[in-house]
Amino acid sequence: MTPLRRVYNDPIEILDVDYSDRIIGIEACLWSEYIHTTQRLEQQLFPRLYAVAEISWSQERDYQDFKARLSKFMDKCHPDGLNYTPQEEWNPTGAVRQQETLAYLETINKAMSPEVYKETAEAANPNRYFTEKFTKSFFVLEEDMPILKQMNELKE
């Protein structure tokens, strides 16, 4: 659900205290309880896992360079038979991104028991502020939700 460029460009949190002698790596989480096939699992992992690997071991970040190298790597070195997200789908925007995200959220809602669902924010009829804040946590205004960008400009 997270675009590749966002995975690559998201900052790694820096700890207030220097624990570098205790850190042996970083974690790349994937919520697999809503992924129902091996093919979809692999598509969710790759190439995102390659982005996580690079940002965790490299001090330099250049997304355009990474994309160029990744394309060649995927063609040449990615194991045959292992599924991955095709390059044209690495960074969905606009209606495509909205559709994917809302479909994912709908899957989560359908999986909830009625008891759990009644405790969610959606069931509580959230106010506009909550809805905007929640939506902005999933979408990038300029790319995914032009209508929200327009709403923000109207408020200002």
Image: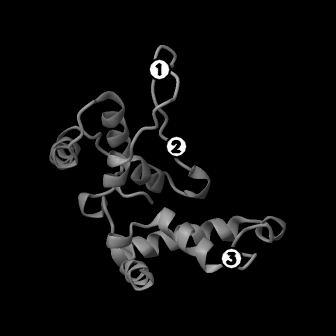
Q: Could one spot residue 23 in this view of the protein? A: yes
The residue lying at 39 percent from left, 66 percent from top is: 140
Mark 3: which amino acid? Pro
Separation of marks 2 and 3 at Cα, in angstroms: 28 Å
Mark 1: which amino acid? Ile
Judge left or right: residue 65 versus residue 14: left
Mark 2: which amino acid? Cys
Residue 154 coordinates in the image, percent (x, y):
41, 86
Q: Which residue is mark 3?
A: 126
Give the tally of numbered discs: 3
For the residues bearing labels 3 and 1, Cβ distance under 8 angstroms? no
Please report whichever mark, 1 or 2, sits nearer to the chain's N-terminal start. 1
Separation of marks 1 and 2 at Cα, in angstroms: 16 Å
Please report whichever mark, 3 or 1, sits nearer to the chain's N-terminal start. 1
The residue lying at 28 percent from left, 58 percent from top is: 86
Q: Residues within 10 Å of mark 2 (few under 14, many from 20)?
A: few
Q: Where 62 falls versus 24 (above or below)?
A: below
Q: Where 24 falls versus 81 (above or below)?
A: above
Quarter of the image where the C terminus is located:
bottom left
Can you tell which quarter of the image residue 124 is in? bottom right
Which secondary structure lies at badge 2? loop
Quarter of the image where the N terminus is located:
bottom left
Residue 12 coordinates in the image, percent (x, y):
42, 38
Q: Of the numbered discs in the image, which one, if any, rests on residue 29?
A: 2
Of residue 66 and residue 82, the one placed in the foreground of this image is 66
Which secondary structure lies at badge 3? loop
Judge left or right: residue 112 versus residue 82: right
Q: Which residue is mark 1?
A: 24
